[in-house]
Amino acid sequence: MIKINEKLKPADLGKKIEKLWELSAAKIHSIEKNYDTAKGSPVFTVKGKYTTRGWTEWTQGFQYGAAILQFDATGETGFLEIGRDRTLRFMAPHLTHMGVHDHGFNNVSTYGNLLRLLGEGRIEGSEWEKHFYELALKCSGAAQARRWTSIHDGTGYIYSFNGPQSLFADTMRSLRSLALGHRLGHVLMEEGDEKINLLRRLVEHAFNNGRYNVYYREGRDSYDLRGRTVHESIFNLNDGNYRCPSSQQGFSPFTTWTRGLAWVMCGYPEELEFLDTLDDAAFEEIGDRKEIEAMMLKAAEAACDFYIAHTPVDGVPYWDTGAPNLHKLGDCLNKPADPFNDHEPVDASAAAIAAQGLLRLGHWLQSKGKKKKGQRYWQAGLTVLDTIFDEPYLSFDKKHQGLLLHSVYHRPNGWDYIPPKRKVPCGESSMWGDYHVREAALYVQRIIRQEPYHTFFHTIGT
């Protein structure tokens, strides 16, 4: 269980955040200078150098979005130009990519961040540039909403790249593309000019993700621990009925892959923040506002509670809570995680994502007057960041292109590099881990400096 530091304050992380941005700058420049984009998007490092792995193109937005976050945090215009130029040159195919569930990853991290900065007055741009980013986000939201499977009760979900039968936990974080499309007044046009409400699809997906991918100790099956998540739920396409849990990147359907858990933890709180910005008229077509909010809060609290209870004291999880060799580590939850052990890898990228979910949930609850409960999540988030904003997780090695070390991509497939004389993957980075540790740093930095609260939708569509 995480040993929550109740006395930790955002300002206490200030020096570590300053160092993070210093290290980050050099790593962005190294990738820009040395990575061959003709090979595909960089995904994770091998021996400290970024390489690719063909599955889907879901990390390019993190690559160029990282430069935009670097500018946001430091004001160094060179990084803005990298982000702006590469978004224009390389990101267009992602806007109409019909084969993935990753629109919120690729497009909100690039077009979305640029539009947000325009709205904040942080960057200058013409009215046409603003409309260009808005149009991109509208297309992305509609394309994401088009990947739709209807189920037995008339609701549905955004299906994963595995096919229409597959509901992924990851997609909770990608709902931000639908949120921005809706906020910009867009709809998905279907056959017969039917107008599909993007907010409805967002809410229905969140509902079904919470119903099938998150557990609540309500007697669902023999492994029904509150807050446990599965990576994937499988449906029968003939009748729309749920069939079984599954996992692509976790150990099993009956254990919790911790990065999937983290996507859930981060996705629900930020959508709760988004719902707060909508007027009551937006809910007339989709359902009761209080019931929708309660559904999202139930999933968010359960997942965050599970993470706190099933993660080592320093806040960094092992890659799966049921990984087969965890027992060889002894009482691993009551001591700091060991990224250099011989039995099971940790996943610091899950920690970076989860920390932001904890902070956002804590902040949201406190804004609703639930100070004590919210403070617990808030302090847990700061505790996790206090760990990963430093060695051995933050990469101080100037020759290593990664920023956040000890990230795991696909343990079952054996895609992660194992260094000589080691028995499990360690010491490597991922594009999503690096992006999310930067995003978490920016979030806290803005709190410290009393700058506008960081959300993916701030100033967009207003």
Image (spheres, rainbow, N blue to C red):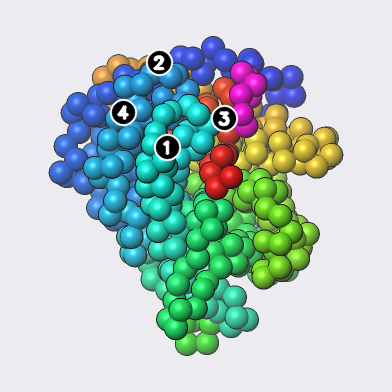
User: Disc 4 to disc 3, how far (Cα)?
Assistant: 22 Å
Q: Is residue 410 left or right of residue 170?
A: left
Q: Which badge, 2 or 3, comes first in the chain's sequence?
A: 2
SS of the residue under disc 2: helix
Up-down relation of residue 453 to residue 322 (above or below): above
Up-down relation of residue 38 to residue 33 (above or below): below
Q: Which badge, 4 or 2, comes first in the chain's sequence?
A: 2
**Most distant residue in the bottom direction:** 238
The residue type indicated by label 1 comes to Leu
Residue 448 sits inside the magenta stretch:
yes
Residue 326 in view:
no
Quarter of the rendering containing residue 86: top left
Badge 3: residue crowd in 10 Å (few <14, some 14–19, many ≥20) = many
Q: Which mark identifies residue 443? A: 3
Report the residue marked by disc 1: 114
Q: Nearer the viewer, mark 4 or mark 3?
A: 4
Badge 1: residue crowd in 10 Å (few <14, some 14–19, many ≥20) = many
Magenta-colored span: 447-453
**In x, y percent, where is residue 398?**
30, 16
**In x, y percent, where is residue 1?**
67, 36
Residue 17 in view:
yes
Q: Nearer the viewer, residue 290 or 357?
A: 290
User: Disc 4 to disc 1, how far (Cα)?
Assistant: 11 Å
